[in-house]
Every structure is written in C-alpha cells, then in structure tokens.
Amino acid sequence: MVRTGETICAPATASGGALSLIRVSGPQSIEICNKIFRPFKSRKSLTEETGFRVRYGEILDGNKIIDDVLVTVFRKPDSYTGEDSIEISCHGSPYIVRKILELLIKNGAVSARPGEFTMRAFINGRMDLSQAEAVADLIASSSEASHRLAIHQMRGGFSDEIKALRQELLHFASLIELELDFGEEDVEFADRNELLRLIRKIKDISLKLSSSFKTGNAIKNGIPVVIAGKPNSGKSTLLNALLMEERAIVSDIPGTTRDYIEDSIFIEGVEYRFIDTAGLRETSDDVELLGIKKTLEKIKQAEIILLVDEVTDNPDIINKRAEYLRKITDNENKRIIILINKIDIESSSEYVNLKKRLFDEVKLGKNDSLLFISAKNKIGIEELKEKLSEVIGTEWRDSEDVIISNIRHYEALNNVAESLARVEEGLNNGLSQDLIAMDIRQAIHYLGEITGEITTDEILNNIFRNFCIGK
C-alpha cells in the first residue's frame, strides 16, 4: 500500500456541493499541477511559490479552459502528509472534478487509495497511528460526544500518555537487560522496589483505560436501546413520541410490527439508537414468528431494554416478562427500564391504586428502573430521556481523563495489563530475570502497537482500508 515515491491525487470532498476540493501529494505534486494551472495575475509559477500560498487562476487542458480555481501550495514537511502538496478548490461539477483528475493522472499522478494521504502523514511522522485512527473517527462522528472523543485523541492526549508509559518501561527494561549481560557478577542496576511501583502504576492505568472502552464505544457508535413488550402495549407509539415524528405505524391490531424499526435521537450530545420490535407473544403466524426471532436477537445486542407494559397489567405478569428478558440476555448488568404505559386511560383514584400496587409488587434488578408514562400523550418522555442519559452520565464531559473507543487499543491495553501482572508476580516470587525481562518486552511491544512505534503491514492495511478516498 505504501507508494511514497509516487504522487497521488483524489477528491477530498463529497460530490453534490457547489465547490469541490482535490488533493494532490507527493514529490511531483507541485510540478504536475504547474503543468495544468495558469495564474491570473502572478508571474510566478507554482514551482517558485513558498508554502501556505493561495493562487487564483485557471485549469487548462491545452488551450481549453476547464475551470477557474484556487490553488493552495504546501511545502514539505509543513503539510498534512509531510510531503509537497497541492489543494485545488474548483466548482462542484462532477465533469470538472473528473476532468481535473484525468489531467493530473495524464501528467504523472496516480489515483489515491482509501486512507493513503493519512498513511503518508503517519509514515512521515506527522501523526502517530492512534491519531491517524482518530481522523477516521472524526470524519465518521455523528454526535457532539463522538466528535469530542475523536478531537481529543487526534490532538494526541491518548498518545502522549501511552508514549510516556512506554518510555518509563523502556528505561527499566534496558537496566534489566544490562543485568543479564553481567549475570555472573550478581549486580543489580534496576531498583526492584521502584520497578514494582512502576509496574503496578502502568498496569492500573492500562486497566483504567481499557475499562473506559465500554463508555467510549457507546459514545462512538451510539447506544442501542430496544423497545420490547407484549403486542399493542404502545411500543410504536413510544418510538414516535421519542423521535417526535410518525416513524412507526400505530394500530389497535396486535402484531402490526412484524420487523424491527430503527432510528436515532441525541440526548445530551450522545446518540441513542432506538429499535422498535415485534411484540413478544405466542403465535402461529410464520411472518410474526420471524419478527419475534429478530426481536430476541436485538434484545441480546442492546445496551438498554425498554420493557413497555400497561398500567392495568398484573404485576406478576410484568415480573415474568422482565425475568424472561434477563434470562435471554444472560447478562445481570443489562439495564431494563420498565415503562408502565397508558396511565391516561384510568380515572385518577383508580390510577393511584394501580400505581401503588405496581410500585409495591414489580420486582427490579440491580440496574432496573420503573417509570410511568403515556406514550400517546407524551407524559413522562422527558423523565425517560433523563433516565437514559444516566447510562453514560455527565462526568466524562468535564473530565480530562482519556476515554478509548477503539477495539484495537482496548485489546492492546488488556495485553499490557496481563503482561505486567506476570511481571509483578515474578518480582514478588523471585522469578528469574530473563523471564521478567521477556514479559516487560511484551508490554513495551503492546504499548508500541497502539501508537504505531511497532506495527505490521497487516495492521496498517486493516486500519487504512476503512478510510474514505481523499483522506
């Protein structure tokens, strides 16, 4: 994938806008663009321009004018890729973009592959690997929260912490390696108590970072929330109330929802992906059975389950439904919010008695909640949103702590913690120096994998092939 000797080009903006940006990077980028660009006022050619200069002129195909453009010149190493680069701002016509790309390729450039500009930035030391991954996360961010995580990582907060930890380990590793060279002389260069303190510190930090993955992953990808319950309990009405639009068909006929319906809203800057599912009941309808099967799959995948019941339901039946959900998820930490719907259909005195009975007799798990709502009249919807926002909480907003959202980082940090746990055990039990040194080297390796100080072509290809063209 690495083609550092070639000059690459690609559109850096999506089609359909009034303007488009074409990015060119590589050793011949300025010379190639100079062949097809004529400035309107400046007598300087692009090859004579210093970096960070913008020139107004026209793109030519021989004597034929293709478009009036702005051309920005970047000189290495002060560009996104660390190479000589050009950015051409032209009109958004698909014909114009395609024609300019054809001219660039005709004059020596090649089409860029997905992520190739950012890969060059990594290879040329403009960013480390975790920062490069944050670029993709930033482009894909769909909420304030996911944008904030990506920006923090791209600015190097996570990288700086990992590099500092790795440097401290490298120092002690070199001392232990030195001891191995003087094995017969019984010398000790690395203070064992200080080393043990460092190992425990880095292990604890690694575990703390990896434990933040659940929050980071939820912020990055959105929190899946399944709306489940018996047919005709008001699940689709609840989805419409949350989305504030008629997204799902509402009918008095049980079993209307045969397939799941999914849509998202943002609460406190975090995306929540709501999934309205087929009602849970015994049925002989083959199509409805397929819907119920999909419902069970979505329930297992969900972070939160909204169990919609009715105010007139028997508490024992509600408890059985909740217990059934806990059983099929096989996860005691799964959050179930039991929603007692249709509180508007009863007289005041009757409702008070029913509510009291449900409060007293509905059994809640350690992560469960009980709320009373009217999806039809939008009563209790704001309280439900507040309860949902408690899943992530607000502490992360004002905290300077790093939150990871990348599965590759999560796995590497767990490997670091495991390696250092073996080092700690070895130091406490007087294990031989060469085995301790081996585990320290492994921890250093895993830390290096995060930032790209140690990497393989397979890892790089897996990361950058998911990028968009032009980035």
Image: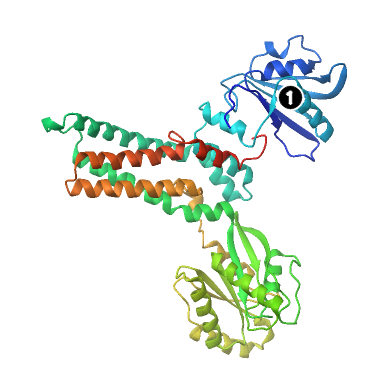
- Residue at horizontal 71 percent and vertical 14 percent from the top: 46
Residue 22's place in the image compared with 265, above or below, is: above
Q: Single out the residue that lies furthest toward the top.
A: 43
Query: Farthest residue toward the left?
Result: 185
350 relative position to 315: left or right:
right
Q: Residue 302: in sight, yes or no?
A: no
Instruction: Report the residue marked by disc 1.
Output: 105
Whole-percent x and y of residue 374?
66, 77
Please say which color scheme the image uses: rainbow
Neighbor class of circle 1 (other Cα within 10 Å; few <14, some 14-19, many 20+) is some
Q: Percent position (x, y) of residue 423?
A: 26, 45
The structure residue drawn at horizontal position 67% and vertical position 34%, both measured from the top left corner, is 470
Front residue of 29 and 405: 29
Residue 104 % position (x, y):
74, 23
Q: Depth check: 376 or 368 in front?
A: 368
Quarter of the figure that contains the C terminus: top right
